[in-house]
Amino acid sequence: MNLANLTTSEFLEGIYANNVAIVSKAITIVESTKPEHRIIANEIIAGCISKKHDSIRIGITGVPGAGKSTFIEQFGGLLTGLGKKVAVLTVDPSSSRTKGSILGDKTRMEELVKNPNAYIRPSASGSSLGGVTRKTRESILILEAAGFNCILIETIGVGQSETAVHDMVDFFLLLKLAGAGDELQGIKRGIIEMADAIVITKADGDNIKRADFARMEFTRALHMFPPKENGWTPEVLTCSAIDNKGLEEIWQLIDRYCEDMKASGYFNANRQQQNENWLIQYLEQELLTEFYQHTKTKEMLPQLKKEVISGNISPFLAAEKLLKALKQS
Amino acid sequence: MNLANLTTSEFLEGIYANNVAIVSKAITIVESTKPEHRIIANEIIAGCISKKHDSIRIGITGVPGAGKSTFIEQFGGLLTGLGKKVAVLTVDPSSSRTKGSILGDKTRMEELVKNPNAYIRPSASGSSLGGVTRKTRESILILEAAGFNCILIETIGVGQSETAVHDMVDFFLLLKLAGAGDELQGIKRGIIEMADAIVITKADGDNIKRADFARMEFTRALHMFPPKENGWTPEVLTCSAIDNKGLEEIWQLIDRYCEDMKASGYFNANRQQQNENWLIQYLEQELLTEFYQHTKTKEMLPQLKKEVISGNISPFLAAEKLLKALKQS
């Protein structure tokens, strides 16, 4: 079959049948910026969204070196062992800079790559976070329609992408190395309060004591936070990929979370809210992109910014000047 | 003098001379939604922004009952005793609902109201957070031009307003009652990570032990956070308004913060960044308001939202439909 010329129904048939080559091609179409691809992409998504599947979307974040690849390799293996179908996506708007390391990650997940019940897709590329998140969200819909029921979404935890990922998953997991606190250096403020669970990685050998101490400290720290809207109390766990310890407990925790949240109605309400958020965010982002690309805006904004920064003009007056000029143009 | 018919230069003269009646009237003009007031408001702001003053803007947040009014009453008194001129503003977009309690607050600050070196302005009213923050930011400029050099901005810590306040101050203070954790209930997640200092209030009588314990716990918890971009380590202090204890230490901490941040250049860089943020936020907010008021948007959006929430249509496709219809209209 020549994948280059598939019709929408051929795409959908292939996706529904979990044909991984066609799933990959469909994601490539969704990621494409060509207008002719956009049309078929929208048709594919429309066909996928109507297929309802029971799935769990898990966000996994942590700074480089926190052990994300090793964790996903082993955690993914555990999940397929439980009969799940696992898909791994990465969100990294700056992937053009780090392409090497992401391909490297994929190679490092040697076992998971070979696993017939797992699918790994390196980062969507794109210059804007908005573009990347749209592509990721649409990829999730394709993967779920293809029968993948555990979607792991990886992000590197140092940029703007965590909030976006938090807004597209059911459960948000923060991976951390045990250590003297230096390892927090790269993590963006606010992420700790987003986490549904924190996992201290590499809890093996000489590190066990330190990891246990970190687990206790974080448990205390999380206790100081206001409770989450959904009533969930975030937990702190340790794990070791080398010793293959702690992974089942993490899955049990996530499973319990899903059960609780489905029982309370939060699980579904949250997904509906996320859908509404995507609509609004995408709308607003498109409108603002258009504004910033307007000739008049491009001409006036840099100078107005300078005057505002130097305190010569009120930010509000500067904004009014620009809006007035736009209306007249 | 009939304040109703002041010219711009009369306003500015009065403001520069710290004529409190004229300052109040100028803030009323800034808060007004009448177009003819907007013109003179812009002229007043232009005249105020050119006056450079050394000031500190302090955000104070805490849930109702955390002791904000009592704290501001005493802290304001301490500052005027040190020769400062203190202005208190409140930010509360929902003030129409809580007008009673805010006027009540003003009455409760009995001493500060009578203090000739202090000025208290109840919340700007307005339906949108954006509107309220513009008014508050412009009021700050007027107050600074009038020679007030300690601006205290109070917010109730339960809504969206804290991020807005955080983005208009130099120092962000979170007030908390010592207690069993219940008092966290109302606080929005993310606020703790914003705080430059946490103050445990009502540390007197039977509460002293509990307050000290809370101070220790929060100090430990803050230690688990990533360091702030500016290198500042948030501290946790206790205070008692009844025993008049701990207030000087709070001021010393803020003073040390200012010295450190001025020495590093962060203080000024942060204000410049805030100015730029105000420009961009205001621009974007105006553009989006216009969009949401568009007839076509009002007509199409509710139905599209419903379909997106029920999962019948992709959020992105829904957005594209609306944008296309807008372009054709």
Image: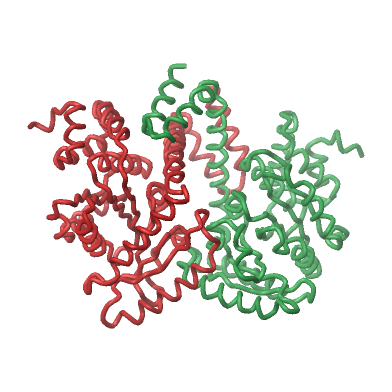
Chain colours: A red, B green
**Picture quarter with the N terminus of chain A:** top left
Q: Does the rendering let one see residue B291?
A: yes
Rendered location of residue A52, percent (x, y) = 32, 38
Q: Nearer the viewer, residue A261 or A219?
A: A261
Left or right: A13, with A255 as reference point: left
Question: Residue A15 sits in which quadrant?
Answer: top left
Q: Is residue A200 above or below residue A10?
A: below
Please name the residue shown 22% across and 74% down the image.
A243
Rendered location of residue A35, percent (x, y) = 27, 27
Please name the residue shown 44% across and 33% down the image.
A283
Extreme residue toward the front, this view: A263
Q: Is residue A132 above or below residue A171?
A: above
Q: Is residue A260 above or below residue B39?
A: below
Question: Residue A81 sits in which quadrant?
Answer: bottom left
Rendered location of residue A56, percent (x, y) = 33, 50
Question: Residue B194 sits in which quadrant?
Answer: bottom right
Numbered circles on residues, count: 0
Q: Is residue B47 above or below residue B264?
A: above
Left or right: B1, with B149 as reference point: right
Q: Does the rendering let one see residue A289?
A: no
Rendered location of residue A264, percent (x, y) = 47, 51
Extreme residue toward the left, this view: A1
